Amino acid sequence: LLHKTAIVNSSQRSKALYIEALESLPPSVQSCPGTKVTLASLYASSSNNHGKETAEKLLSSLGDDIPAKLAMAEFHLERGRYEDVIELLLGIVEEEAEESS
């Protein structure tokens, strides 16, 4: 819910408040894929290079497990990067198929 609210509310001041709120959460919450993707979305929507670099660092720290891949897919989906979403989801399906057999 916070993620959707933060993305819809586009003023820079509001984004800064959301970033501050998310960064004040305990480390156990900050390390969750959803929190990282929300922060990355907020940083990626900023107009400066520092924000975009921070978003890339957050996304690269997600890891390679299924929740991380789903969070990345959501991030790409919001930006209309559908081929990246398909690639991530197909990778999940293939991994699960290999583990099942």
Image (cartoon, helix red, strand yellow):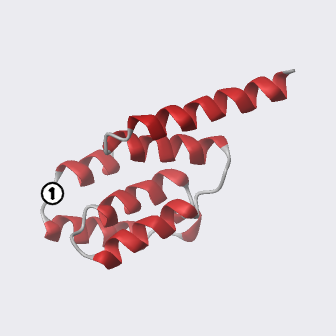
Give the residue furthest to the right: 101
**Quarter occupied by residue 31:** bottom right
Give the residue furthest to the front: 83
x and y, in percent, of residue 5 in the image = 24, 49
Residue at the (35%, 69%) spot, across then down? 52
> Along the line of sight, which residue is nearer the eye, 21 or 12?
12
Q: On the picture, is 14 further left or further right than 24?
A: left
Q: What element carries label 1?
A: loop
x and y, in percent, of residue 98 in the image = 81, 27
Residue at the (15%, 71%) spot, across then down? 13
Image quadrant where one finds the C terminus: top right
Q: Name the residue under label 1.
A: 10
Q: On the picture, is 8 further left or further right than 25?
A: left
Q: Identify whether 63 is placed above or below 12.
A: above
> Along the line of sight, which residue is nearer the eye, 90 or 6?
90
Image quadrant where one finds the N terminus: top left
Residue at the (50%, 60%) spot, across then down? 59
Q: Look at label 1 and name its amino acid.
A: Ser
For the residue carrying disc 1, how many other residues have a C-alpha within 10 Å: few (<14), some (14-19), or many (20+)? few
Residue at the (70%, 28%) spot, across then down? 94
Q: On the picture, is 94 further left or further right than 80?
A: right
Give the residue furthest to the left: 11
